[in-house]
Image (spheres, helix red, strand yellow):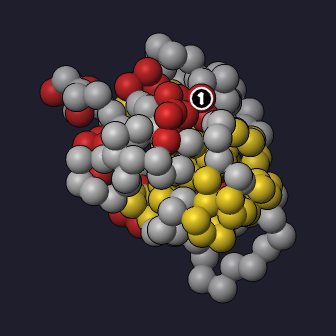
Amino acid sequence: MKLKALVLVPLAVSALALTACSSDDGGDALDTTSCAPVPQGFSGQPTWTVDGTSGKATFAVTDDAKNAAPKIDLSTPFKVDQTQVKTLKQGSGAEVTDASTVTVCYEGVNGTTGKTFDSAYDRGAPEQFPASGVVPGFRKALVGQKVGSTVGVVIPSADGYPQGSGDGSINPGDTIVFGLKILGIEG
């Protein structure tokens, strides 16, 4: 639940009670109830490579049909000076807007340490939150994407946590990296 504490503005009690569902727009039916970690032994080809101002990040789509996490490999310290977003696999569902409440599987990695600081994939369950309620870089990874999309994003400190996170897992100046899959939207 770190993402809620780190990224999200406080949610109303009613928002916490929302169930994981998506708008029915004729897109592929998605499992909106589970997330899975990167399959053991996965060594697929990179889908996206980002050369940072220092270090390198690579993303590879794993078993997307089972909502498995994209594999993220970093050479640390990894830093970027601007947010970069890449659709690793295009979904066919409705488009996320600022007004959407999204259901997402995600993993966040600190570019300085290479350590995962939050992962719905590791918890095995997606999170649901308003697209407008996250740090600017994460919002850029959501808005405009379609349900079913798997997305990679690298976020400099200015679009993430310029003062660091309250729990100390992200320090001032740290780049953060997310791999995510959008499972559904409301609104």
Residue at image location 41% in from the left, 38% down from the top: 162
What amino acid type should be assigned to the residue bearing mark 1?
Lys
Image quarter for residue 81? top right
Residue at image location 65% in from the left, 36% down from the top: 82
Q: Nearest the camera: 149 or 174? A: 174
Q: Nearest the camera: 171 or 45? A: 171
Residue at image location 34% in from the left, 40% down from the top: 163
Question: From this viewpoint, is residue 158 visible?
Answer: yes
Q: Which residue is mark 1?
A: 140
Residue 28, relative to residue 66: is it above or below?
A: above
Q: Position of residue 13 (x, y in %)?
A: 16, 27
Residue 122, relative to residue 32: is it above or below?
A: below
Number of labelled discs? 1
Question: From this viewpoint, is residue 68 visible?
Answer: no
Q: Position of residue 29 (x, y in %)?
A: 62, 41
Outermost left residue: 13
Residue at image location 54% in from the left, 59% down from the top: 111
Q: Position of residue 46 (x, y in %)?
A: 80, 65
Q: Nearest the camera: 78 or 9? A: 78
Residue 36, relative to residue 185: is it above or below?
A: below
Image quarter for residue 94? top right
Q: Nearest the camera: 90 or 92? A: 90
Q: Residues within 10 Å of mark 1 (few under 14, many from 20)?
A: many
- Is 19 on the left or on the right of 52, as rendered? left
Q: Position of residue 177 (x, y in %)?
A: 56, 52
